[in-house]
Amino acid sequence: MTRLVCAAAAVVLLAAPGVAACARNSDGTPVKVEASTSSTAVASSSTSPSTRVTDVPESSEPGVLETTRAPIPPDATVCRSEQSGPTAVAAVSDPAAPKITVRMPPGWSSTPGTGDVGALLSGPDDMVAEVTIAATPLDPSAAFTRYGDDVMARYPISTLSLLPGDFCGFSGQKLMGTWARDPDESLEYQDRIAHIWTNTGSYLVAVHVEAPSGTAGFDAAASVLTDEFSIVIP
């Protein structure tokens, strides 16, 4: 399987509206996707230089920022999104893992997950979602590349488009595409992933939403679920 990297798009997307994002299909063929500018601002840090370490990314992956490593106090809310309506909290057994709060569309419900799955969510018309929180030794670019490759490998027919999805100073991406075992029956999906550093290591958080292709209300529900989420570092 070929990994498509759009070096120019990752930079231009952050600066100008209506430009092409990275996309590919299951045979690695480039696909042009129109995208709008992200309005998310990178949060500034007031930590002194003596306690602040940054890793400057060398990557063409959309949404990859410098990783800032500064001491974080216990139970710190490092990102608080403006959330109205019902929410779901995703947490895993790892005591050092971040806790995530996502918005839920009307008519959705959530239950706790197991392992790296912090929450399982279900909606009408066979729409489902899950929030995974997994420790990773990889930097943001490598973690995002692996995640995208895993998404593409799940079905024999698959497409994937990428947009920058960084927020609150964390590297992030938005993914969308389709899966199919044959051309007559397919699924559509949208994901929001973020690379989150804690005092003890890094975690890849992923919000994944899927439904049968053409499901009414999928885009609206996925937009809510993959919006910026709240993050608490234990």
Image (spheres, helix red, strand yellow):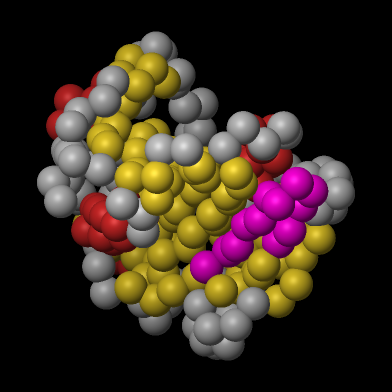
Location of residue 26 (image quadrant)? top left
Residue 80 visible within the image: no
In the image, taking residue 159 as reference, residue 120 lies left or right, namely right
Residue range corresponding to the magenta coloring: 121-132
The image shows residue 67, relative to residue 179, as above or below, that is: below
216 magenta-colored: no
In the foreground, 221 or 212: 212
In the foreground, 73 or 23: 23
Q: Residue at x 66, y 56 (%)?
A: 128
In the foreground, 141 or 154: 154
Q: Residue at x 67, y 67 (%)?
A: 120
Location of residue 231 (image quadrant)? bottom right
Q: Residue at x 54, y 54 (%)?
A: 208
The image shows residue 196, relative to residue 74, as above or below, that is: above
Q: Position of residue 114 (x, y in %)?
A: 60, 82
In the image, taking residue 123 as reference, residue 113 lies left or right, namely left
In the foreground, 45 or 185: 185
Location of residue 143 (image quadrant)? bottom left
The image shows residue 58, relative to residue 183, as above or below, that is: below
Q: Position of residue 172 (x, y in %)?
A: 41, 48
Q: Position of residue 229 (x, y in %)?
A: 62, 52
